[in-house]
Amino acid sequence: MLYRDRRPLIVFLVPGFLLMLVFLYYPFLVNIFNSLFDIRSMAGRQETFQGLANYRKFFLEDPIGRVALVNSVKIMALTAVFQVGMALILALMVDSIKKGQQFFRVVYFFPIVISATAIGLMFNLFYSYDGGMFNQIRAWFGLDRVFWLDKDRAFTMLAIPILWQYVGFYFVILLTGLSGIPEEVYESAALDGATGLKKVWYITLPLVSDVLVTCTTLAVTGSIKVFDLPSVIARNGAPNGLTHFLGTYMHNQAFVAQNVDYGSAISIVIVVFGVIAAQSVTRLLGRFARSEV
């Protein structure tokens, strides 16, 4: 037993629990309550009880709400596949070299240090119709300018910085997990004739499966909360609300449109959707990891 007397631990655990109770669980319960009533402003009062009307509106009547939900599901899938996948590929490559690992750690982790607002402004400069870097490159080749954030390209252009920003974060975590695999394991596998992709599939992935599950779960839950980059690059879901995600649409309804009750309902959808997604990913990847061991 690590601690014989557990009473001092309570002194450190209770303040953290109280902070979570006040700033996390209490607002969550208030949002549930608000979503069931008709509230017209942030300072408004409960006028009439309307039950699940806001949830029915979101899932059945609001086309922009459905767009936000679909966009969130799409970015969640892209994050799990490309963000974690690219981080894994980079980690495997960097782990195979003897010198320069620290350099690549710094280079790939650097985007995490930059604020999302700064990244959003940078990509705005890339996408700008007048004088943007992408259109300048097209002009050098004699091509016409392109409106990169039109209805056909907007989601893709938003997905690029969202996926790019956190690749380095999961890269560092996965590289740390890979560095913990004993070299003797690979040497034994080489004696048995395992090379290249066989080593990765039969040795590396099973041994870092727990780390991979953790990274994927974090990536999926983080993607559901996407807010800052879309808000900077495509304000108010431009064009025509087609680039709204659950987080941006919740903010738009609660603080811009002053539909506090509807915004509260969307926030509850985000929480429930996040919990379901996290549990589903953890169980699915956990079963796969156990089958490979």
Image (tube, rainbow, N blue to C red):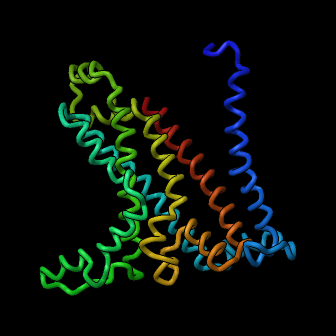
Instruction: Name the side, left or right, on which 137 lies relative to 226.
Output: left
- In which quadrant of the rendered view does residue 164 lie? bottom left
Q: Residue 257: percent from the left, percent from the top?
A: 65, 80
x and y, in percent, of residue 224 in the image: 54, 59
Residue at the limit of the structure toward the left, as seen here: 141
Residue in front for this viewpoint, 141 or 255: 255
Front-most of 246 and 233? Answer: 233
Measuring 48% from the left and 58% from the top, which residue is drawn there? 76
Question: Closer to the camera, 63 or 16?
Answer: 16
In the rendered image, residue 241, in percent from the top left (x then y), is placed at 52, 80
- Residue at left offset 59%, top offset 46%: 279
- For image coordinates 43% across by 56% down, the residue present is 79
Residue at 19% x, 37% y: name it.
100
Judge from the rendering whether residue 252 lies leftward or rightward of residue 185; answer left or right: right
Q: Is residue 83 above or below residue 19?
A: below
For the N terminus, the quadrant is top right
Residue 205 visible in the current orientation: yes
In percent of width and height, residue 128 lies at: 31, 79
